[in-house]
Structure formats: structure tokens, C-alpha cells
Image: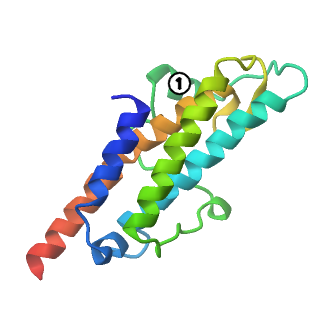
Amino acid sequence: MNDFELIAKYKSFLHHYTLEQLRYIPEPGVWSMGQLYDHLIVVAHEYLDSVEACAKVEGEQEQGKTEFGERLFNNGGFPPIKIKLPPELDAPPDNEKLTEDIVRELDRLSERMKQIGMKADEINPNKKVEHGGFGWLNAQEWLALVGMHFRHHLRQKEELDQKLKIRRSIE
């Protein structure tokens, strides 16, 4: 499944949740489904911003990826682990959006990905921007991160679905 199909699949999942389910936080420190979606969208736009930043880099960057970044790209995705961000990067995502807002944002994200994707292959692969955990990435790698990140969070989505299923059976 390509990145656009994956985003469309996430979009179709949204119609299975009531607003209450979308905003339900199952326990302290665990995101709601709405927060998961917000996180995916916000981070995807950050990655796309970095694609655009690569096009503006002066000169070429010789530095490469970190060890974790090398593993990530060699494996084609994130490992099946929970990744804890440092506190300064771990603010809780928005939990107030309506389903329609999230659908619109996913549509905008897909459109932006198409526009940027058409340009990314033309950007010199030696023009890179640094990622705090993965090292120096080029435009094509930043773009690939969007899909990798959405795939990585499918596990979290399944866990949240289970928590919602258990909650529904108790009510």
C-alpha cells in the first residue's frame, strides 16, 4: 500500500468513531484517537517542511544518518517499539478537533504530499537537513518518513481500538 492509500485508509477509519470515542483518553499518558491523528498530521507537515528546506540548502552536506537513522531506512520503517520523545518535544496533541476537521486536514496533507512529491526527486540528494534522531536526511528521505511514521502508528491505533472495544463492552 502506498502512502496515499495509507492516508486514505486512516481517513476511512475515522468514520467508525463517535466524537466521544475520538476524544476518549483511556488512561493518563495515553493519547486519544483524535490526538493520534493530530500527531500524525502535525509531524507529516514538519517532515514536508524539511523536504522544502532541503531544496533551499546552500551547498551539499557530507554528513550522514545516525546509527538509528541507518537502521530505520535500511529496514524501511520504524521498529515495532514505542518511542518516547524528550519532554520538550512531547506536548500532548490537540484533542478538540471534529471528525470533519481531521478529514479535511488529511485531504490537505495528501494534496501537499502530491505537490511536494513531484518536486522531491529533483532535489539534489546531497542537500540535507538534520533530524534530531536520525541524522542528516535528504528530501527523498524526509518524504519517505511520512509514510513510515503513519505505518508505525498503526500499532498504536490498534491498541486504542482495543481499549475502545473494552470500554464499549463495559458500558
Q: Residue at x 70, y 17 (%)?
A: 122
Q: Residue furthest right?
A: 58
Q: Is residue 71 above or below residue 166?
A: above
What is the crowding at mark 1: few (fewer than 14 residues within 10 Å), some, or many (at least 20)?
A: some
Which percent across, then down, holds residue 140? 62, 24
Q: Residue furthest bottom?
A: 171
Front residue of 85 and 114: 114
Quarter placement of the N terminus: top left
| Residue 141 picture quarter | top right
Front residue of 27 and 109: 109
Q: Is residue 96 visible?
A: yes
Q: Is residue 83 visible?
A: no
Q: Residue at x 46, y 36 (%)?
A: 147
How is this picture coloured? rainbow
What's the residue type where badge 1 is placed?
Answer: Phe
Q: Residue at x 15, y 69 (%)?
A: 166
Q: Residue at x 64, y 18 (%)?
A: 121
Quarter placement of the C terminus: bottom left
Q: Is residue 83 above or below residue 31?
A: above
In the image, taking residue 95 as reference, residue 115 lies left or right, namely: right
User: What residue does disc 1 label?
Assistant: 73
Which percent across, then down, holds residue 39? 51, 57
Q: Secondary structure at mark 1?
A: helix
Which percent across, then down, holds residue 81? 40, 44
Number of labels in the image equals 1
Q: Is residue 152 above or below residue 96?
A: above
Which percent across, then down, holds residue 45? 61, 48
| Residue 86 picture quarter | bottom right
Q: Is residue 139 above or below residue 93?
A: above
